[in-house]
Amino acid sequence: MAAGIEVSKATIALDLMREIGPGGSGYLTAEHTLRHLRGPEYYTPSLAVRGRERAWEAAGGKDTYALARAKGPGVRREARGGL
């Protein structure tokens, strides 16, 4: 995220948007979209609760707050330089 988001003719795909038009379908399955879907700008938060509910429950069922509390002490140590 610190590097920013690339904005160019290739990444914007204005031609594709014009081709599909408002209310059109197919943008999400277009080759361009699939090629750029998980580009360097894509960010997955480490504390996000994602996936199926059964898998989440099997992993302990921790919500975002519980995940943050568990991760907190390590984050503080890293911020202090490992002290």
Image: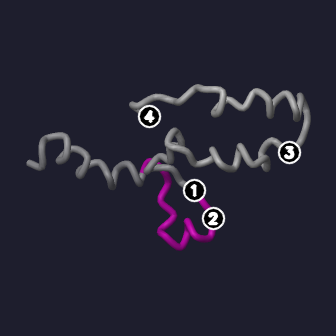
Mark 2 or mark 3, earlier in chain? 3
Which residue carries the number 4 mark?
Answer: 1
Do the CB atoms of the residues marked 2 and 1 lie less than 8 Å apart?
no
Mark 4 or mark 3, earlier in chain? 4
Mark pair 2, 4: CA separation? 29 Å
Q: Label 4's element? A: loop
Q: Does the magenta stretch include residue 61?
A: yes
| Colouring | one colour
Q: Residues within 10 Å of mark 4 (few under 14, many from 20)?
A: few
Residue 82 drawn at (x, y percent) = 12, 49
Mark pair 2, 3: CA separation? 29 Å
| Above or below for 61 versus 33 | below
Q: Quadrant of residue 8?
A: top right
Which residue carries the number 1 mark?
Answer: 50
Mark pair 4, 1: CA separation? 20 Å
11 sits to left or right of 27 = left
Magenta residues span: 51-65
Which residue carries the number 2 mark?
Answer: 53
User: In the rendering, which numbered label is found on residue 26?
Assistant: 3
Q: Label 3's element? A: loop
Identify which amino acid the numbered label 3 is placed on. Gly
Identify which amino acid the numbered label 4 is placed on. Met
Q: How crowded is mark 3: few (under 14 residues within 10 Å), some or many (20 or more)?
A: few
Identify which amino acid the numbered label 2 is placed on. Glu
Q: Nearer the viewer, mark 3 or mark 1?
A: 3
Q: Label 1's element? A: loop
Q: Residues within 10 Å of mark 1 (few under 14, many from 20)?
A: few
Residue at x 89%, y 28% (from the top left corner) = 22
Residue 72 drawn at (x, y percent) = 29, 48
Mark pair 2, 1: CA separation? 8 Å
Mark pair 4, 3: CA separation? 28 Å
Residue at x 63%, y 44% (from the top left corner) = 36
